Image (tube, rainbow, N blue to C red):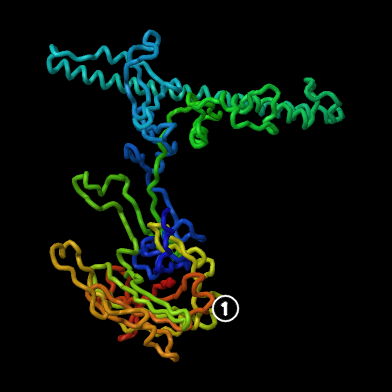
Amino acid sequence: MAAAQQPPPGGVVYVDHANHLTPLTLAYHATASRHLTTGRSDVIPPSTTVEIDSVYCPRCLTFCDAASASSGVCQKDNGGCKDCPVCFSPVSISIDENTSDPASTGRLVCHYLCGHCQWSSQECGVTSNADKLLEYTTSDDMDASSEKEAEKQRGIAIAGISSELELCLQQRMQEKNNVGDALMNSITKMWAEREQEEQRRKRMMISTTAPKGDIGSGGQSWSMDILEQSLLEKKKELDSPYTHDKEGSDPATDTIESNDTKDIPKNIPTPQQMAAQMTLTTTTPQSRSDLFPLPVTYRTRVSRRCRAELAEGRTGILIKPKLNPLEGDSSLRAGHGQWWKKDSSAVHVVPRVQLCRHGADPTSQKYASLLKVKNPTLNMIRLRLSGWSIPEEEKEEAPLIDPRELQNVLVDPFTETFVHGRLCAPTTAASLSPTDFFVLDPADDPFLDIGKAQEDDPSEVRDWDAMSTIGALGDGNTSQLRVVATHGDTAWVELVLCNAVSAEEISSSYLAVPLTMQIEVGNGSWEASLIKRRDLPEGEKDLVALNLVTLLR
């Protein structure tokens, strides 16, 4: 028996310009912007706009711009790539010896073949004659030029045979669609005739009530009963022969016994296979012989723009892909790792705040946690942490965080872990005094440290304990933020909360503590953000405030 999944100890999420909570890995920072933007598509209202730049086939990796992808499926040579209608794996075009009826269909047959489940398009009648390849066989007595010419002619013949196979597939699907099209045309024609009949009756002042006994007797009286009866008869024409086999049975009332399914074939398509086929044909497949190979749907490559930046008249491009999906791959000669034309992911610019350790004392309603702040850029960053507070006149109009945002907080996008949070007391967040400004050195290149001994954390961090910190607090202590230690591109900050939540709420959900990260702009700090320093008096710091929420269990 598998062990129950343990709830996460907590986490840190960031707040974007629309007050959506998001992990830093799903956030973006627009060029020279003073706020963050989430790239999540499950938030309302969305913080970004999405534009389709290009599409590509996941099978053959052919690509084109959005204007050329009107069909929505791969259109490479000879009809494009196909998937198996049974197991949905890729299929290939195969030319094999015909073992069914060589006299009528030829010695060689071209068909779609699945390498996973061995499904063949011969089951649905989609084949083409490949006997033309026999004219270009090679032998040992042929010279090099003749052999090369034969290979060229074989390639041309294979292309023609593949085109004939695609044409056969289109014809077979058209035959299937003719039944549904005929039904739709008959219904449309019937409605037109009924409308003309009704108009004639109105002109002739004839009653529209159907005489008793006309239903089912072939009368042409206009009534809803006759219309429903006509639709029911046409529907029965498309009913599966395996739904009810007994003569005179009613599918609405009859039940199928567990031992009464011996007449039903074992090759009836599954609901998933039927749903996939209904995108190609208008009739429901009854057996595997009605399953056609599926075209491969294009995948889109999109660019995102920040709505707040667009509202201010700026481009706000957050991420923009390249046309070729392989560009940036090591298989190409140049541009290795350069997957995007522009990538403004926040993990490359914004300092990352993580929850290292924490503890809680339910009796005294005190929390203690150790936060780790790391610089991801190649430039120095000067910043501090403080409590998140708003003016008194705005507290009633706009709460710190919308309660709906805390009902389902995504803390880990890789494992798709969601938690329920409860906002701490407003006085607790407002009483947090800012820390002193601390400096984060440029990020260390991990590849330069290969072979070197790994440096340990400072002794203040190794010896830090949550319960010891809580025990050292007195009854009159208040919530506080304190820098424990700094080392290179990393700093550790202690967060202590007193009377943050009532005793009944401690175990019900995660405690959400709003904080603000104030980053200095200018004077050599945070140059990677490209934010221009405002014209302020000398000695006054230009601070960019990024809000975040710490979730404690």
Q: In this view, does 359 lie to the left or right of 174?
A: left
Q: Where is residue 470 in the image (x, y as percent from the top left)?
A: 39, 83
Q: Is there any visible trace of residue 37 in the rendered image?
A: no
Task: Quadrant for residue 12, please give it.
Answer: bottom left
Whole-percent x and y of residue 25? 36, 61
Is residue 462 among the parts visible in the rendering? yes
Answer with the quarter of the image where residue 29 lies.
Answer: bottom left
* 280 up-or-down from 479: above or below: above
The residue that mark 1 highlights is 396
Could you tell me the amino acid type at mark 1?
A: Glu
Task: Check the image and name the residue furthest to the top.
Answer: 103
Q: Disc count in the image?
A: 1
- The residue at 79%/28% (across/down) is 222
Left or right, 202 with reference to 445 = right
Q: Looking at the image, which is closer to me, 62 or 415?
A: 415
Q: Position of residue 212 (x, y in %)?
A: 86, 26
Q: Which residue is drawn at 86% across and 28% down?
A: 206
Residue with the most extreme front position: 1
505 vs 466, left or right, is right
Q: Residue at x 35, y 73 (%)?
A: 357
Image quadrant in which the C terminus is located: bottom left
Residue 191 pos. (x, y %): 70, 29
Which of 503 and 303 lies nearest the eye of the viewer? Answer: 503
Report the residue at 49% width, 75% height from top. 506
Q: In this view, does 526 lie above or below 232?
A: below
